[in-house]
Image (cartoon, grey):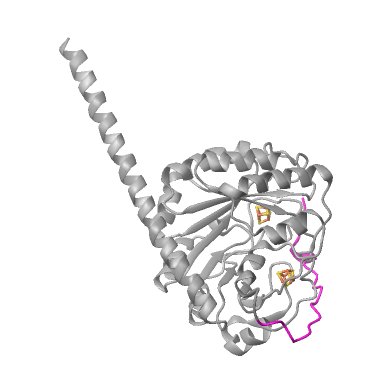
Amino acid sequence: MRLLESVCFNRLVYSRLRGMLTRSFKFSRDLRALNRRMREWRMIARGVLSRDHPVMAHIIPIRRCNLSCTYCNEYDDFSKPIPPATMIERLDQLADLGTTIITFSGGEPLLHPDLDSLIANTRKRGVIAGLITNGYLLTPQRIRQLNDAGLDHMQISIDNVMPDEVSKKSLKVLDKKLQMLAAHALFHVNINSVLGGGIHNPQDALVVGRRAIELGFTSTIGIIHDGDGQLRPIGEREREVFLEMKGLEKKNFSQLNYFQDNIAHGRPSDWRCRAGARYLYVCEDGLVHYCSQQRGFPAKPLGQYTVEDIRREYMTKKGCAPMCTISCVHQISYMDFWRDPQTIDSTVPAESTANLVQIK
Ligand code: SF4
Ligand code: SF4
């Protein structure tokens, strides 16, 4: 009898302790979310008041990736991590330009051994820190380290339910990682799924989107672009899935509808791409490019990039804009949608990115 009472007592204590820990985790996560939202509101206000600073930069700490998705032209399988001192110099240069959000991308940024200190350095400069990862290297401990570093946002792309020859970023493989994130991440998590590009079953995007929402994340959908960031036509089935995802988006999704509707219907969009000004892509060589798909212009070293460059690119038309699918640049450029028609003509170079593509 005594033994039974003792077991019951221990169970009660355990369940109370677990309840307290869960409440304390939720409280910490809510507090971090509140703090993040306040900084984001400040970012929007500052972005509307001043046009002379980048709102978002993507930076590449390592070009190497542990996967080899066949549609990707942004990775290799041999590059070394950029030395931390070089990365910190670049992060400081972006902060000096007034950049509000810096997102680490790749390749696979979690392969960089000093990523946490780079994130901490970003936050120390008052910049919002984001990370785009394939999620394969996440563990509970790695997630807690990212919490401690001060990461604000993480995005994981999941392309299908079962892995196939196009992509191994599948829900089957990554669902455990998503559960770990739901249990441990204090930062915001967005799950992106992709349509087109040889993804066999477009319905998979819906399964992924619903699972993301079930776990308390946000979810977005992208349509695969060609090597110049331009729209590839999508089929009827994909369009149906896309529109269904957008139905969910009203409650849970956060993309800007104007561009996405046009993309789904293969129509050009009338907008002003502010890449090179409001959005910067900093490659592993420390050069500023318009975006991941228009590398080669202006291709100026970040250390020499000034407010004059930002002002020029802000007013420069991009010939690739009408059929562009790069949603982060759409979102950032939307801030200035209503003002400053672009008056400088540009011939956007169709720089080949073929040397980065490693299809196995
Ligand atoms: S899309 Fe695939 S290959 Fe390209 S960086 Fe992401 S995980 Fe690596
Ligand atoms: S319109 Fe802008 S974001 Fe889109 S591909 Fe061209 S330069 Fe890149």
Magenta residues, start to end: 340-360
Q: From what the image shows, is residue 310 above or below residue 255? A: below
Query: 360 or 267: which is nearer to us?
Result: 267
Q: From what the image shows, is residue 85 above or below residue 185? A: below
- Magenta span: chief secondary structure: loop
Query: 355 or 277: which is nearer to us?
Result: 277
**Residue 139 rendering spot, x and y as whole percentages:** 47, 45
Q: Quadrant of ligand 1?
A: bottom right
| Direction left: furthest residue | 2
Answer with left or right where residue 329 lies relative to residue 30: right
**Residue 309 rendering spot, x and y as whole percentages:** 64, 86
Residue drawn 76% across and 43% down? Answer: 240
**Residue 97 rendering spot, x and y as whole percentages:** 52, 82
Q: Can residue 135 be seen here?
A: no
Answer with left or right where residue 143 lies relative to residue 343: left
| Direction top: furthest residue | 1
Residue drawn 60% across and 67% down? Answer: 60
* Quadrant of the image containing the N terminus: top left
**Residue 332 rendering spot, x and y as whole percentages:** 61, 69
Q: Can residue 250 be seen here?
A: yes
Q: From what the image shows, is residue 60 above or below residue 90? A: above
| Direction bottom: furthest residue | 308
Residue 262 belongs to the span the image colors magenta? no
Query: 185 or 274: which is nearer to us?
Result: 274
